[in-house]
Amino acid sequence: MKHIMKVGLILIIVATVIIVGVGATAALAAPPFSQVQGTIAGKTADTVTIAPKDGGDDVVLKVNGSTQITKAGIGKATLGDLLVNDRVVATYTVSGDIKTASKLTVTQPLAKNHGFVGNITIVSSTSIKITTKKQGDVPITVNGDTKFNVPGVKDATLANFDNGDRVAVLAVEGTSGDYVALHVNLIPGKPESVQHVGTVTYYIANTTITIKDKKNVSFEFKVTTDTKILFKRGATDGESIIGKQATVIASRDLATDVYTARAILVFGPKGKP
């Protein structure tokens, strides 16, 4: 029995040594990751030199095909897109005297960040132009990394913006001296209320109504179950309102630019009570 217990104890010790040895080997095999935050002080064809934010000696990192590089306003970038004085957060591994960058997250110097407030005058698939009080007309590039924000709209895109919209834009200077938008935010104005008088030319209950005014200008409004329809001057609910005079009071949805009728006043022939 003592012999069996002794053998069992030896096996436990051996197993423990093996587990500890494997763990130590794995720890040695895992590359030691380090991080440095600062500004780019220089670069060569395959290295980047970073001046640490908290002082100390410059850190020279080797850059290779496995290094992940992103830059604000560009997205996926290359070493050629990085400029001296750019701000950077770098994760790197150390092997002997060689430090190799695994990830570089780069932003422009604070001086190259710009904020603009104005009204959109042109919208294209790759840019917007806004008119500002101080800088005048400012063309701004948008790309896949641009974030769009519209109050009340989830996952807003450039399609949610139109001419006349007032926006606040945070942009950075691009490599060509242009401005590249990081964020485009719609500035909500006061809910716009309108009132139009005309002849009803099209109407579907709880869906839509179109009226044409004296100048033959048509206006279309969304109609919902909350829209109040009032009948005046002899007009009744039991007859079609197409062809009758009506006043539509509506509000504009800032997110969709759609006018929704809050109230529709339908009038019968003049002279009736």
Image (cartoon, rainbow, N blue to C red):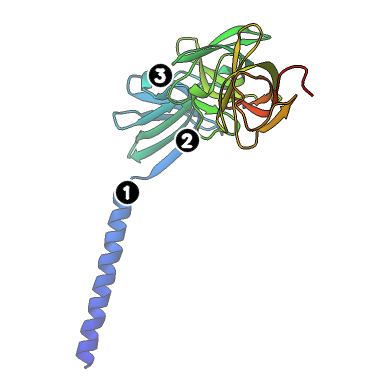
- Rendered residue at 78%/17% (across/down): 271
Q: Quadrant of residue 250?
A: top right
Q: Report which residue position mark 2 lands on.
A: 36
Residues at marks 2 and 3 touching, judged by CB atoms closer than 8 Å = no
Residues at marks 1 and 3 touching, judged by CB atoms closer than 8 Å = no
Counting from the top left corner in percent of width and height, residue 93 is at 36, 39
Counting from the top left corner in percent of width and height, residue 9 is at 26, 81
Amino acid type of disc 2? Val
Mark 3 Cα within 10 Å, few/some/many (few <14, many 20+)?
Answer: some
In the displayed structure, would residue 124 be above or below residue 104? Answer: above
Horizontal side of 105 relative to 215 (left or right) equals left
In the displayed structure, would residue 215 be above or below residue 4? Answer: above
Residue sitting farthest toward the right: 273
Q: Report which residue position mark 1 lands on.
A: 30
Give 103 or 125, whichever is nearer the viewer. Answer: 125
Q: Between disc 2 and disc 3, whose residue precedes?
A: 2
SS class, disc 3 = helix
